Image (spheres, helix red, strand yellow):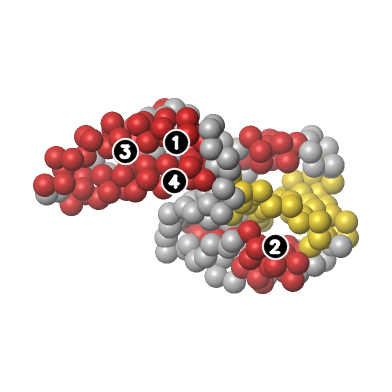
Amino acid sequence: MISARHLRALAAPFRRTPLHPQWMAGDRCEVRRMLAGVQGGAVLDVGCADRWIENELPGHCAYVGLDHPAIGGATYGARPTIFGDATRLPLRDGVFDYVVALEVVEHLPDPYAALQEMARVIKPGGGLILSMPFMYPVHDDPHDYQRFTEHGLARALAMVGFTEVQITGSPHALRTAALATCLALAGSAVEALRKGGPALLVVPVVAIAVPVVNVTAWAASRVFPEWRAMPAGYLVRAAKA
């Protein structure tokens, strides 16, 4: 029986094409632009995983990656500079110019404590770059605990002392709907392959439906105006007062 891991490996070469269920999730271009604009200094990457942002930062930045020893290390093979808990960072106050936390907050049992800790270790006038999914399936379970709306994120960041909060939702609502549909189709197909039964007969239809949904949503999103209430996720930039 083909496993979900094997299917992901088979689909990987098509990640940037309409044939892939996550095509509408886009890429990291906007995050990369933010990282490239970091004005030097010390940067803490919370939930660093494979440290991919290290190569996106300007060369004069001092990079420190942090990940959780049990979740990041044992489960995902993270390669941090230091292991630690985001809700109790093993670092002094005000030592970083920037903190980066990409797709991390949804996996923290106490997100408010983690945001408070991030604010604590940032120098006054320093910055935060953060991303978080909104309309996106549960992933990395059982360590997926919450989603925040744009207003919930703004409120949480203000509570711990961040100012000049800029929140951008993406992609277009129609592309978000396509992403959710394609992921539901792909996830259901994986379950059919795992469990067997009559649903197996419908699995080949997914290979046709995914590109049709993707291309239709892409074309429609170029005609219809944006509806901000339905992004797949948020990208945040904020400053510490």
Q: Name the residue at 36% across, 31% down.
A: 211
Look at mark 4 in the image and give the residue it sits on. Answer: 177
Using the image, determine if residue 63 lies above or below residue 141. above
Looking at the picture, how far across and down is residue 238, in whole percent? 77, 55
Mark 2 and mark 3 lie on one chain; the one further toward the N terminus is 3
Q: Is residue 1 visible?
A: no
Do the numbered discs 2 and 3 sit on residues whose CB atoms are within 8 Å?
no
| 20 displayed left or right of 236 | left
Look at mark 3 in the image and give the residue it sits on. Answer: 7
Look at mark 1 in the image and give the residue it sits on. Answer: 217
Looking at the picture, how far across and down is residue 102, in whole percent? 62, 51
Residue type (three-letter) at the residue carrying disc 1: Ala
Mark 4 and mark 2 lie on one chain; the one further toward the N terminus is 2
Residue type (three-letter) at the residue carrying disc 3: Leu
Q: Nearer the viewer, residue 231 or 106?
A: 231
Looking at the picture, how far across and down is residue 128, in whole percent? 75, 54
Look at mark 2 in the image and give the residue it sits on. Answer: 154
